Image: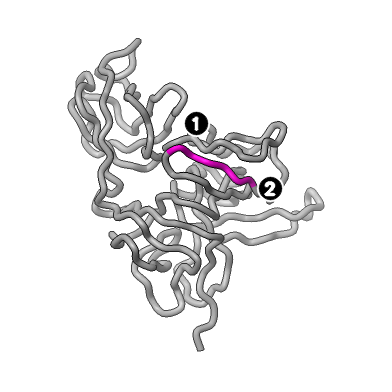
Amino acid sequence: MSKFRNLIPLAGTRPINQVYAPDATLDENMGTLVPAVSYYFGGGEFVFCFFPAITPEKALVALTPTFDSTNNRWRINATAVANTANLAQPLGVAVMPATAANVYGWVQIGGITPVACNAAVAADTSFGIAAAGQGGAVAAGKQVLNARIVGASSTTIVKTSAGAVNGIGVTGNNQIQLNNCDGLFVGGYVAGTGIAAGAKITAVDTSESVITVSANHTATVVGNVTMTPNNGTIFYNTAFLNRPFAQGAIT
């Protein structure tokens, strides 16, 4: 995934990219809103949140202001949105997976981003809450408002591997040096010579053009590396967000 660059510099602001995963240290003011721009995805808007539970990559999350009595301050909880109608609640997309509970990280609320869904959704189509933490087909009371699918989960992205580089890309390793990482994101499924079947991206280092995958290589990675944004069960459709929210009352 292309790294997002903050448009309004804030001293000590945690980078909005997939090298820096959520962690348990509150090193940003809760609820901080940051506009940022990516070469590939364009401009976006992000809010700093608290993840009280493990949250998958690119999950559709509900944003709930909650008073933290222990620290005597408000925080914004980001949790996988419930598969419930008429929530009338602000939503966003988790930038990185929260692999543990009670961590902090960024949620995207504006701009273009892949979003986890339970089915393919055609481009230029509205979408809804279809499962816990996932988008999908629209149903009564479950539409995600102020958002629209702009890219289908069938669109592949092809990069060129640099082959074996300083121990990267060789048998038993789980990193790949590429010509660039534009458009790649944590959760995308990758295939190519030497890449284990079913491998998915677990980290993206845009500065070094290196991705980390979930399984060790079966041979030296050479030639094209293809990322497919679905595995037949999880579908990463690309959405355009404008501070989205779950549909409210419809009667």
Residue 180 sits in which quadrant? top left
Residue designated by label 1: 19
Please say whether residue 126 is one of the residues in the magenta stretch: no
Q: Position of residue 59 (x, y in %)?
A: 45, 53
Q: Magenta part mainly helix, strand or loop?
A: strand
* SS at circle 2: loop
Q: Is residue 19 above or below residue 125?
A: above
Left or right of 66 on screen, residue 95 = left
* SS at circle 1: loop
The residue stretch that appears in magenta: 34-39
Q: Position of residue 13 (x, y in %)?
A: 66, 35
Which of 185/97 is in front? 185
Q: Is residue 211 above or below residue 169?
A: below
Q: Is residue 249 above or below residue 167?
A: below
- Disc 2 and disc 1: Cα gap in Å? 20 Å
Q: Residue at x 41, y 63 (%)?
A: 148
Q: Residue at x 54, y 66 (%)?
A: 245
Q: Position of residue 111 (x, y in %)?
A: 49, 52
